[in-house]
Each structure stands twice: as structure tokens, then as C-alpha cells.
Image (cartoon, grey):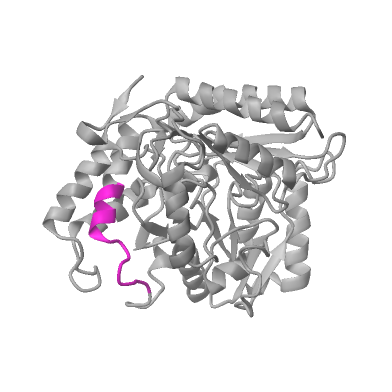
Amino acid sequence: MTDLLTGPRTVAQERRLVTEVPGPRSRELAARRAAAVTSAVGSVLPVYVERAAGGVVVDVDGNSFLDLGSGIAVTSVGHAAPEVVAAVQAQVAAFTHTCFMVGPYEGYVAVAEELDRLTPGDHEKRTALFNSGAEAVENAVKVARVATGRSAVVVFDHAYHGRTNLTMALTAKNKPYKHGFGPFAGEVYRVPMSYPYRDEPGMTGEQAAARAISLIETQIGAENVAAVLIEPVQGEGGFVVPAPGFLPALTEWCRRSGAVFIADEVQTGFCRTGAWFAAEHEQVVPDLVATAKGIAGGLPLAGLTGRAELMDAVHTGGLGGTYGGNPVACAAALATIRTMRDQDLNGAARAIEATMLPRLRALQERTGVVGDVRGRGAMLAVELVRPGTNEPDAALTNAVSRACHAEGVITLTAGTFGNVLRFLPPLVIGQDLLTEALDVLDAAFDAHAAAR
């Protein structure tokens, strides 16, 4: 057993339940929340967090949970990563804010330099920083429209891109993201995604791309398309990995037609899939890359990086925001990237895949309720269905997830049909913790899948 941090904030790297879940203090906080916080904001866990480190989250009752969620792919370097904590403390003591558009500072420039180096392609690049993934995506659309003089944006079934008005329009799923919030921004067009588990058997990536491109050309018109926007591995849509050849074919079409190819790497970026960016798995070089989540070890930061001629096409002052590239978040990002590089967290993500995939496939064989096992690196998922069919089973998915929570393991659900369990462990999680978490998952399936 390893302890992280020091003094009274030491967090033992172990699963430990000392009360029922939720415990009395969490129930007390839930009552306070009900009286103070809108019910429109939901939470996955029924407990309230007091501290966290590495791959463990501790609640206010002293229960320790193994984390297979990383705050939705944010704490990839682990909770309270020491180098990130030190960098944040130093920056807070220096200054917390000036607004880069008023008084610029080196940290913003240094983060931009790192993103220009790390994102795919050796072309000249420029970067702008924001607060959230939705902001990064929305600004990518703005850049593409200015640079091309066109307005249409192509997105895909099962996509998720954010909760602003424009990014809700870009997002596919109605509830909980879009329901009742329209009208939405216009000139957004949706085409089919390559979804190997649910596509026609044997459909290749190239064939799925041809299907999408045919719709683009006949229903939108290539000359009207400013951008094609896609997650290289879909996140909220259920960790859908397109068939090989799909992304390269779309990229090539964009090159021929003059459209901008935008990769939404908000959830897939920063070593999550075993490469710095998921587009690299098929040697795809996007024109623009939107990033956030894992970039800053838990602090709010996002980036948009792309070809210099595209990014510089926007007039001065056209991109920005009061908090975009906050100095404390930039310090955290630089420390996070150093940690990823120094600890080879791309290799760590691949090692997590090597441990988890065989266990998940064994679960598929044993239970008969797992229709598909998929993902890359430390971004893995199982899609749950009724036995002998591909009919989604959201009820079982939720039951298994809740059972894991009750036994001290944090899991998340996803998918257009609500029937996907997704796994996003911190890339620094210990092998012993990962194995123990998978044992709990097995037990949860054994307890709930037998009745199906």
C-alpha cells in the first residue's frame, strides 16, 4: 500500500469502506444541497468528496473509492499530482489573474508552445486558450467559418461537443443535454458515424466514410462546408471507435473540398488513448485540434491549436475571454505535460489497456450481456445489451454502475442509449488497484446480470 501526500492529507492508495454508502455526513450534505443547489445539476456519486490523491477518492465519511472515472478524463496524472500541486502553489503566490488580453504573461505563451509542438503535424501552428472544451470547440467553428468564408458545419451521430448553444446544436443526444433548450444555432448538419458494433456487418471505415460523404455532397454541398468536426473516439456517445480508414477518408475529403477538419480531442487528448492525441493512431493530421479535460491536472483550461494560416485568419480581438489561459491553470498545464512526459503516461495508458481488455472480454464471454468491448488505451468501454440481441440495456448498465459505487469503485455510464459503462482511470493508477477495481466490477455483473 502506498500513501500519497503528507501530513493530515495523506491518502492511502486503497479501497476502504467504513460506513454504508452514502454515509451520514454525505447524507447531511445531500440535504443541504437539496435546499441550496438547483436540481438541474446532477451527480453520479451519492457521496461528497473530502480529499483525493493518485487513484483514490475519499469521501467526508472516510470511505476510500478506487477511481475509474478521473473526473471524466481530467485527472489523468492522478488526483493532487505532486508536481501540479507545487506549480499551482507557486503561481498562486505570484499572481492569480491579470487577463491575458490586458497584461500577458509567459505561462500562456509556454502552454501554447507545448500545444504547437505536441498536436499532430509538423506544419506551423498557433494556439489560443480558453476555459472549457465547449469553448474550444465553439471557437474552432468560428475560426473555420472566418478562414473559409463558408457556414455549414458537419457533425456525426452520437457526437457530444458541449453545452453552449452552438455546441448543443453540434451534440447529438437530446436528454439531458438539449431537451427544451432550443432553438439552436443553425447551419449544423448531422451524418452517420462509423459505429462498427451497430453498422451493417463487414462495413469498412472507407465505406462508412463514403456513406457520410455522399450525404454531405448531396444534402449540403461541398462548397458550403466550412468544417467537418469529429471526436476521433466518441466520448459521451459511448466510446465509439470508428472503423480503420474512416478518419483518413474524411480528412482526405476535407483536403479536396477546402473544408477544415477539426478533431475534438477534449476527452481523447493528453495520453488518454496511449498516444498524445487519438488522431495519431491512424496518422491523421487535423487542421484544428480542440483540447481541454486532461490538459491541466484538474484545473479549468482548454486550447485550440491549428494551422497558422487558419488561426491567424481571425481579426485581432476576435478570440479570447476574461479567464481564458488563467495563469494558475497554465502553471498546472505545464506541470501536467511534464509529468506525462517524464512518467511516460502514453506507455501507462497502453499498459492499462493490456490489463483491462482481457478482463472485459472475459466478462463478455461469461455473462452474455456485453455486446461489445471497445476503446483505446485507458479509454475503454463495454456496451450492455439484452442476451442474444443488440437491444440496449440501460437498466442493467445503471444497476452495475451503482453496485460498483456501493462497493467503493467509481464508474461512469455513457452512450446514446445509456447502455455503456466507460472506464477512464488515472494513468498513474497502481496495477493492484486496477485489478481490485476489476474484481469489484466482475462481482457487480455476477450479482445483476444473472437475472437477465
Q: Residue furthest right?
A: 388
Horizontal relation, residue 188 to residue 298: left or right: right
Residue at 74% across, 67% down: 217
Of 167 and 432, nearer the camera is 432
- Residue 410 at x, y = what percent? 52, 38
Of 121 and 342, nearer the camera is 342
Of 418 and 162, nearer the camera is 418
Residue at 37% across, 72% down: 319
Residue at 70% across, 54% down: 416
Of 189 and 378, nearer the camera is 378
Whether residue 244 is visible here, answered yes or no, is: no
Q: Quadrant of residue 411?
A: top right
Q: Quadrant of residue 154?
A: bottom right
- Residue 26 at x, y = what percent? 44, 47
* Residues shaded magenta: 319-333
Whether residue 152 is visible here, answered yes or no, is: yes
Q: Quadrant of residue 427?
A: top left
Position of 93 relative to 228 (above/below):
above
Quadrant where the C terminus lies? top right
- Residue 45 at x, y = what percent? 52, 46
Quadrant where the N terminus lies? top left
- Residue 142 at x, y = what percent? 48, 73
**Magenta span contains residue 168:** no
How many numbered circles are shown? 0
